[in-house]
Amino acid sequence: MPDSPDARAGTPRSLDLQRDRGLTVEWSDGTRSFFPIAHLRRMSPSADAKELREQMERNPLTVLPSGRTAGGPLIATHAELVGNYAIRIEFSDGHRTGLYSWSYLREIDPGPHA
């Protein structure tokens, strides 16, 4: 099943992380996605980020964490591939528990890009 055409279409052909801008993914089906750093951080698949998004849906007045970084804007400080199915990204605010699977990145794509 992993070698089916549908599975291959959902895998990246290339990844380009610009730590201060975002992640560009060129998918095997030829499409390209760009994920700004702030979007990746906000949409982290970690349990704490999911809980925060659920709280915000229930109560739009939810107080957000400060997201402060040590003396500068939010950036990606480190990234690593996890097997052949995901990427883990660490952020300058200390968040490092999000594991972005290829299918999750497709789900949170902020918009199509050529």
Image: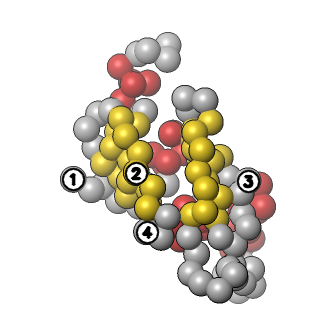
Distance from the alpha carbon under mark 4 to that under mark 2: 10 Å
- Secondary element under disc 4, as helix, strand or loop, is loop
Question: x%, y% of residue 8?
Answer: 39, 25
Mark 4–mark 1 CB contact (< 8 Å): no
| Disc with the residue nearer the chain's start (3 vs 2) | 2
Image-quadrant location for residue 87 = top right
Distance from the alpha carbon under mark 3 to that under mark 1: 30 Å
Q: Amino acid at mark 2?
A: Asp
On residue 21, which mark appears? 4
| Disc with the residue nearer the chain's start (3 vs 4) | 4
Report which residue position mark 2 lands on: 16
Q: Which residue is more in the foreground, 59 or 37?
A: 37
Q: Which residue is more in the foreground, 8 or 15?
A: 15
Distance from the alpha carbon under mark 3 to that under mark 4: 20 Å
Residue at 57%, 64% (x, y): give it: 76
Residue at 58%, 51% (x, y): give it: 79
Task: Please name which of the two marks, 4 or 1, marks the residue nearer to the observer.
Answer: 4
